[in-house]
Image (cartoon, rainbow, N blue to C red):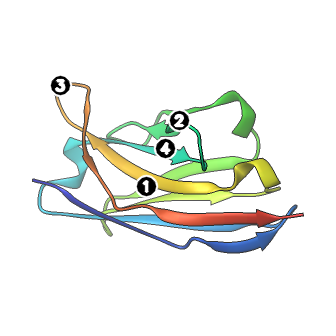
Amino acid sequence: QVRLVESGGGLVQAGGSLRLSCAASGRTFTNYAMGWFRQAPGKEREFVGSISRSGDRTYYKDSVKGRFTISRDSAKNTMYLQMNSLKVEDTAVYYCAASGDRGVYDYWGQGTQVTVSS
């Protein structure tokens, strides 16, 4: 079992920045690839980006490329999502998730709200 807790959400003006954190506990952090997802009101949850177990590979949704950066710190069992140049359309609840050997995101955090105002 992996427990994930997101933090760092809040209200920011368009063009601003936020850094989300995802703290993991319960199992060896480096056994899991990690991902960020988001869900806006009235919309389905969507993939934002992911990072490999070692942290050497990252993937991003096209609309956030160049603005968002995912990183992880194995010493702190924490993954980060640095979000710059935020847009109103980035408003959503952001979730982190962990993927084990099956390649499926089996573990999810409770989410953190990000609201970008115009």
Q: Which residue is mark 2?
A: 46
Q: CA distance from mark 4 to mark 2?
A: 5 Å
* 80 is higher (above) or lower (below) than 41: below
Along the line of sight, the residue nearer the viewer: 74 or 91: 91
- Residue 7 lies left or right of residue 98; in this view the side is right
Q: Can residue 87 be seen in this snapshot? A: no
Of tags 1 and 4, the one toward the viewer is 4
N-terminal label among 3 and 4: 4
Query: Looking at numbered disc 4 in the image, what kind of residue is underneath it?
Result: Phe
The Cα atoms of the two marked residues, 2 and 3, are separated by 20 Å
Find residue 102 and name its label.
Answer: 3
Disc 1 marks a residue whose amino acid type is Arg
Q: Of label 2 and label 1, which has the lower sequence position?
A: 2
The location of residue 28, given as percent across then percent down, is 15, 54
Q: Amino acid at mark 2?
A: Glu
**Residue 94 in sight here:** yes
Number of the front mark, 1 or 3: 3
Q: Nearer the viewer, residue 48 or 11?
A: 11
Q: Mark 3 vs mark 4: give the one in front.
A: 4
Q: Residues within 10 Å of mark 2 (few under 14, many from 20)?
A: some
Q: Secondary structure at mark 4?
A: strand
> Rounded to the nearest whole Å, what is the CA distance between mark 1 and mark 3?
21 Å
Residue closest to the eye, 31 or 3: 3
Q: Secondary structure at mark 2?
A: strand
Tag count: 4
Which residue was labeled with disc 4?
37
The residue nearer to you, when weighing 98 against 14, is 14
Look at 79% across and 56% down and name the residue there: 86
Q: Could you tell me how far apart the alpha carbons at marks 1 and 4 are, in whole angstroms?
A: 16 Å
Which residue appears at 32% of the width and 59% of the height? Answer: 74
